[in-house]
Amino acid sequence: GADSEILYTGLRITEDACEAYASVSPTDIRQSCLTPPPGSEIISSFYGNMADAAKTAQQPQPVGRGEKAGAEFGYVGVDSVLEQMRRKAMKQGFELNIMAVGQSGLGKSTLINTLFKSKVSRRSVKPDDEERIPKTIEIKSISHDIEEKGVRMKLTVIDTPGFGDQINNENCWQPIMKFINEQYEQYLQEEININRKKRIPDTRVHCCIYFIPPTGHCLRPIDIEFMRHLSKVVNIVPIIAKADTLTLEERDFFRQKIKEDLRANEIEVYPQKEFDEDAEDRVINDNIREKIPFAVVGSDQEYQVNGKRLLGRRTRWGTVEVENTAHCEFAYLRDLLIRTHMQNLKDITSSIHYEVYRVRRLNEDSTQTHDEEDGHPAVQANGIPAHDVLSHEM
Amino acid sequence: GADSEILYTGLRITEDACEAYASVSPTDIRQSCLTPPPGSEIISSFYGNMADAAKTAQQPQPVGRGEKAGAEFGYVGVDSVLEQMRRKAMKQGFELNIMAVGQSGLGKSTLINTLFKSKVSRRSVKPDDEERIPKTIEIKSISHDIEEKGVRMKLTVIDTPGFGDQINNENCWQPIMKFINEQYEQYLQEEININRKKRIPDTRVHCCIYFIPPTGHCLRPIDIEFMRHLSKVVNIVPIIAKADTLTLEERDFFRQKIKEDLRANEIEVYPQKEFDEDAEDRVINDNIREKIPFAVVGSDQEYQVNGKRLLGRRTRWGTVEVENTAHCEFAYLRDLLIRTHMQNLKDITSSIHYEVYRVRRLNEDSTQTHDEEDGHPAVQANGIPAHDVLSHEM
C-alpha cells in the first residue's frame, strides 16, 4: 500500500508527549504503528530497528546523483534550526546596557574599559581639569558598536557621576531608580503601541555594577540603602573596587562581612537564587554566589611581564596582573558579565524585572481609569497616562 | 597615571556609532584617546597599534600561572553570547506548527511523515475502514516532542480533513482562516494579560502547506480562492502533490502555469518578496521562488537501491527516490521547511502575520470602547471583548 502507516523514525520521539486534540488518541497511533502493512514490498523499517540504522549510517555510503554527500538515511535536520538562529543573531547583533554606580575615585571608568578592553567609558573628572564633582547626580549614557569574531554588539555604558559624593547623600538612589524605571516605561510604551517597531529598542539596564570602596570593614549605610532599593528593579553585581589596597586576608574578611550585611538586609544580588532554572544552573550559580562580591582591580595600562603582554598596575614591589585570578578576581567578573551570563542578565531583566514593572504599571492604570468617565483603552497608542515613575519601587 | 585614558582595544569599534547623550561629545572622546598620558610607564598600547597586536596574538605565548591557556591579550569574549544563546535554546527547545491543506487522497499525511521521517501525521481515512469523508471541515492537531542531535522540538501537525471534498466547497477556506486567527487571538490575549506567562505558548500556524492536485493544467478556482484569502494571514507553501504522475515536462509546464495564476491573482506565497531582509536573502529566496511550487512525492516506505537505504515508491518501471532531487523536489521542500527557513517561517509569522492581526484587533477595540460608557482599558486581563475572529481577514 502506498500510504501504509509505519513509523520509520531516525529521530527520538517522546511518545508520552504525543497529544491528540481531536478524535485521534495516542493509543490509536501506537496501534497503527505496530500493525505491519499487509503485503507491502517494504524491505526494512526504522521502527524498532534503531541499532541496524545506526550501523548502516556509520558505513561509508556511495553518493547517488542529485543527493548531497553525507546525507544520512533518517536524518531530518531539526538541529539546523540552531544554525539558522545563529545566523539571524549575527545579522541582528546584540544589545547590552551596563550601569556603573559608586562614588568618585573608585575606578569605575577604568574598570569598564578593562572589561571591554577599549575606551567605552570616559572619566568624568579629568586629572588635569579643575576637580569638579557634580552637585547633583547626572546620568550619562555612551553607546559603542563593538565587534568581536564577527559578533556585533551595541554596548551602552551608563555612568552616574555624583552618586555618593555630596555632603548629604540622602535619597541619592532615587535618580538612578527613576532612570531605570524610565527605560522600562519606554519599552512598555513601545510594546503596547498599536503600530510597534519590529524590534523594540532595548535601553533597559541589564546590569548595575555597584562599586564598594575597599574599606575592609563592612557595608556603609549608603551601600545598603542603594542595594536594598535597587536590587528590586535591576540585576546588581556588587564588587570590591581597587582591591589591590587589601591583602588576601583582608579581602576574605571584607567579603564575608559584606555577605552578612547583604543577608541581614535581605538584599538579593545577581545571580539571584530564586531565578536558578535547574540543578545545573544552581551548581554554577552557587559557585559564583560563594565568590561574590568579587575583589577587583582594573587597569588600562599594558605591561610586558616575562615576555607576555598583560594589563596591570606596576608598583615598586611588583605588578598586579588584573586578569590573573591569583592576583584579583577581575577575570571572574568579566566571565560573569560577558562570557557566561550576558544572555542570562538580559533574560532576567526582561522576564523578571521588566515584568514586575509592567504588572505594577498596568494594575495602576486599570485602577485609575476605572474612576474616569471617559476611559480610553490603555492599549491605545500613548493611552497610558503620564505618571511618576519613581512610585514604582517595590 | 593610574587612570590615564588610552584606547587599547582588541575589538573593532565603530567610531561613528559612538554616541554620547549627555554632556560628553564624540569629539571629546576622540581627543582624550589621542592624548598620551604624560610620564606614564606604559610600554605599548593597542591604540593605533593593531598590526602589532595581531602579530603578537598569533605567536605562541607562555601560559602564566592562574591564566587560562589560549587566553589572547585583547580578547573580550563578546562572541561567547552565541554559545550562551545556543545553550538556552537547547534547554528551552523549539516549537513548530505546520498545517496541511488539500483535498483527500493527495498524500498529505504521508508527505508530513516523510518530512519528519516519522509517524507525526495520521491518515484520517484508513484504507481498511469504511471510506468516510467528514461532512464538514474538521481541524485536528497532533503534537509530538521530537529530538535530533540534542535539539528538542515540539512539532504540531494540523490537519484539515474535509477541505475540498464536498459537493459544494464554497467558503471552505473560512474554518481554516478562523482557526488561524483563533491562534493569534490566544497569543494576543496572553501577551496583553497583566500576569502573563514567562514564555507564551505558541500555537500560531507557522506554515501552511497547500497541496495542489497534479492535474497538469492550471489552478482550480478553489485553489485560487483558498490561497488568495489565506496568504494574507499565514505563510503558504504550495506544492504539486503526487508529482510522480507527471513527466518532467508536464511538471515544468504546470509549474509555470501555476506561477502565472498566482501572479494574476496577486497571491504572495512564502517566501514573500517584500520580506526579504537584504541582498543575500533576496538571492537565496529568488532561487526558491523560481522553483516554487515544488513538485513532490512522499513515501514512508524504505527500499534498498544499490545497497543504499532510501525512501521511495517502487513501480514495475523503476523506483522513485523521494529524496533524490533528480526524481522530485521533495528535498527542496524539506530544506525550506526545516533546514534553512524554519526560523524565518516563525519570524515572519510573529513579526508580520501576527502583527497585522494585532494592529487590526487593537484598532477595532479602541473604536468599540470609545462608544461605550464604561470603557475598561483593553490591556486589562481579559479586557478585550469577544468578537468574530473571522472578520479579521485582510
Image (cartoon, coloured by chain):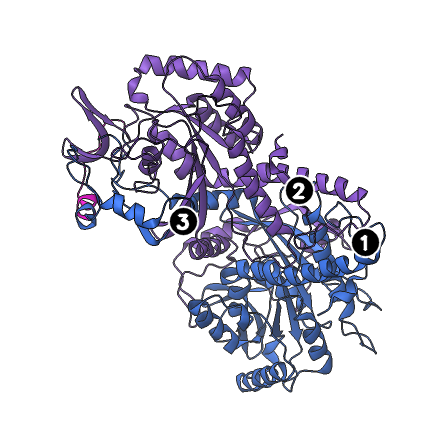
Chain colours: A purple, B blue
Q: Which mark is residue A131?
A: none
Visible residue check, residue A339: yes
Point out which mark residue B385 bears. 1
SS for tag 1?
loop
Name the residue beneath numbered marker 3: A153
- A61 on left or right of B262: left
Residue drawn 68% across the image and 60% down it: B359
User: Label 2 to label 1, Cα distance in Å?
Assistant: 21 Å
Q: Which residues are magenta?
A: B54-66
Proximity of marks 3 and 2: CB atoms separated by less than 8 Å:
no
Residue type at numbered disc 1: Pro
Label 2 or label 1, whichever comes before in sequence order: 2
Q: Are marks 3 and 1 in contact (CB under 8 Å)?
A: no
Q: Is residue B47 above or below residue B319?
A: above
Task: Give the quadrant of residue B241.
Answer: bottom right
Q: Would you say residue B302 sits in the magenta stretch? A: no
Which residue bears the numbered disc 2? B197
